[in-house]
Amino acid sequence: MSAHFLRHGRGLRRARLGALLLVLAASLGGVVAVGLREAQRGYAHLQFERLAAQGAVIQGPVEMFLRVGVALEQFTGFHHLARALREADPTLEAVRVLDARGRILFSEPPGEQSALPLPRRVPSPPGQRFEVTEDARAFRVALPLSDRFGVVGRLELVMSRQAVDLRVLQRFQALFTLLGGCLVFQVAFVLGAQRLWMRRPRRWLGLAFSAGFGVMTLATSLALVDLYSDGLQQRTSSLAHSLARRLNEAARLGLTLSHLRGLDTLLEDYQRSNTDLGSLALIADERVLVQAGSGAGAPGHERFKYTIDLELTEGPWSLPVRLEVGAAKGALDDRLWRGCRGFLFLFVACGLLGLLVLRAFAPLPRRETRPRAFEHGAVDRLQPLAFLGAFLDGLPLAFLATSAEALHPGGGAALLFFAFHGASALAHLYSERSIRDLGPGRFLMGALLLSAAPLLLMAWTGDFRLWLLLRCLSGLGHGALAAGNRAYLLAVFHPQQPPAHGSRLALSRCGGLLGGTVLGALLAAHLGPRAAFLCGGLCALAALAYARLWLPPLDARDKSRGPGPFRASLSWLAPPPLPSSTGSPREHLPALLLVGLPSLLVRGGVLCFALPLWLSGQGEDADRIGQLLALHALGALLCHVLPPPRTARTRRLLQGGVLGMGVALLALGMAGALEPVFVLALGLWGLCHALIQACLKRPRSQGPGEGLARERGPPSITPVVGALGQCLGPLAVSALWHLPSEPLQVLGGLGAGVLLLGAAYFWLTRGLPGREARHA
């Protein structure tokens, strides 16, 4: 298939329709994939808690036995208790008691004499009283067994993975059918209603995309509600039976409720260790005797309640006592919100990608007849490559730091980011000659190939030294791709005209970073890091084919303009004297060094390195980390969606950006452990970071002939300084990260540093004439 066939006539229309259908199918399939992953993780965790509650039926008697000084292997009655659990729960494959050295002392069913180590430990939130390990076949929930002096063994409950997967797939079967129906509808609309949507493609295709996405999101949310409700009911039932068994043991000794002391403490301990419980209460004759949590006995306070009649009695009339356990309404809402965040990010990223594809595959007029329309169309076709560059940057963001620390503890993550951004800075520095020799189009294809190869190789190796080398090559490809995009943009426009539409490329980069962070985290959490690297490499190869077949050839430009000005526009190492109205390097460099460099240094050190490690240490898995880090990209995207500011207000906006970034970092340092503060601070940080970069790069209103001089001036150094800042950031933050007892305090110190450096810049430039735009 020739490039000429794709760019004109029927080939153009077919390529456009195919690309649109691919984006629509990927978007709707992504909704189901996000929902399926969230269902498997959330439902499995509910099953872990249910097994832990069942295990407490055995854990309590064993620990009572140990506290009187008898050895663990002398416990009697294990097989009776374990057999009763397995008969009541068919998903329970085995129950075992192991000593401190891992030897199996008791097992039901009997016969197993050794415990096979499982390769992966499931991340758990802080304060969880049990541990979970997994392999490809089973989950194991382990509860500690303690005597008066410490832990002497553990109780293991083994559950098949197939039981969880089958339950989830059973609830999602109808969703797969609905997905097929939505895809058929989208294909029929795109192919059958071309005359309708081609008149106003944004309106009609946007409406069709939003409708399909909304239907799939609603259906997935309902499936999650059904699944989580079932899991919460099972877990609440297990907790209620566990507590009822402990209370009935007292009744078998001839005791009544009035003989027991500390029941309120017992119920509070149960509620504290199971935060999803709304209330626990002991009720006799419709009177609440003991309760933990508000709203016991009140209708509508909990989502559902579970009631068990106890063997205990109360008072001289032997009134029957019942146990009432309720699940809080927020227990289900919190789990649903985790999935809704993923749907929100997916909607934004896929919607932006669909808009880019719609523009990129629009007909392109000839340069000789309509030069202005050609320039706009060429920028539209360049936007997917800007999207891809940031997409590849964000793809490993959620898991690369933790994977590197696992391969090389004590600094492996910082070295990988140092190598990547250092190589990116070198690519910015030394790409000029290659662009002159090859031309922007061929240089872009080489940069895409250099970006694809390291990602594909990283998927098949686990050696840290090879990872370090491949990240260097990937950084070279990333920097070369950014330099190639900039060179191509300069080549498209008239040499005497300043390049426009930079904000559209910035918007594409923010969308790519958002989509890459969320998708990479989802792939790493569900399929492992290898799948994320493979996805990135294949996307880069697809972009290589796109650049080869779809970018307009630059040799079609007007020869009368000559190549000299374009080549000169790439040189910033020896810029000619600047006109007096454009600002001098002495006015630009302080803003770049005191405001721009610290913001990029903090981004590289905190967002790429420190926060993923801290969140992983808090028990968050990769897709949850990706959703939180994507809030930074979402804030930056909001900055570029808003109308551009007037040049006269640039200084005030820069002040607001510095202040907002400092406040966000201080909030993370002081109250980052609180999720609402963490979420708002990350979004504010992303908004202010993008605002600072936009103010530093924003051109002044220029007269004819000033665009070339501006591109030859100091603003061309900005990408190099940005790459160097993100290169040094991980090293600086890693040196400070383990100094305080609470690592988040480092973020507060960085926020104070950003505020001080920003104040120094504004104080140094306070007396300059025309200071509102001097730094631009």
Image (cartoon, rainbow, N blue to C red):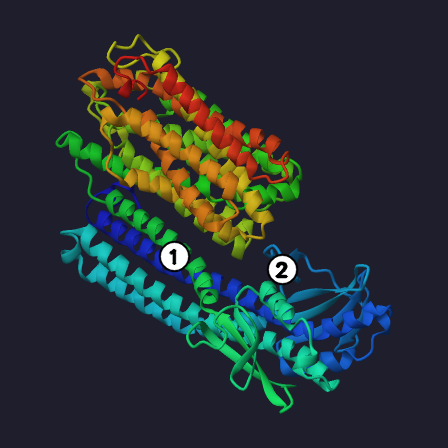
Q: What residue sits right under mark 1 in the picture?
A: 343
Quarter-wise, where is residue 92 in the image? Answer: bottom right
Query: In the image, is 338 to the left or to the right of 708?
Result: right
Query: Element under label 2?
Result: loop
The answer to whether marks 2 and 1 mark residues whose Cβ atoms lie closer than 8 Å is no
Residue 77's place in the image compared with 10, above or below, is below
Closer to us: 315 or 645: 315
Q: Residue 370's spot in the image, x, y percent?
A: 13, 32
- The answer to whether residue 268 shows anywhere in this view is yes
Q: Nearer the viewer, mark 2 or mark 1?
A: 2
Q: Amino acid at mark 2?
A: Gln
Q: Quadrant of the C terminus?
A: top left
Q: Residue 364's spot in the image, x, y percent?
A: 20, 39
Q: Which mark is residue 638?
A: none
Residue 157's place in the image compared with 598, above or below, is below
- The answer to whether residue 564 shows anywhere in this view is no
How crowded pointer 2 is (Cα within 10 Å; few <14, some 14-19, many 20+) is rated as few
Quarter-wise, where is residue 759 in the image? Answer: top left
**For the view shown, which residue lies furthest in the top direction?**
577
Query: In the image, is 129 to the left or to the right of 544?
Result: right
Residue at 41% of width from left, 63% of height from top?
32
Q: Residue 11's spot in the image, x, y percent?
A: 24, 48
Residue at 39% of width from left, 31% of height from top?
659
Q: Amino acid at mark 1?
A: Phe
Q: What residue sits right under mark 2 in the picture?
A: 128
Q: Residue 554's spot in the image, x, y percent?
A: 27, 29
Closer to us: 414 or 469: 414
Query: Element under label 1?
Result: helix
Label whose residue precedes the other's in the sequence (2 or 1): 2
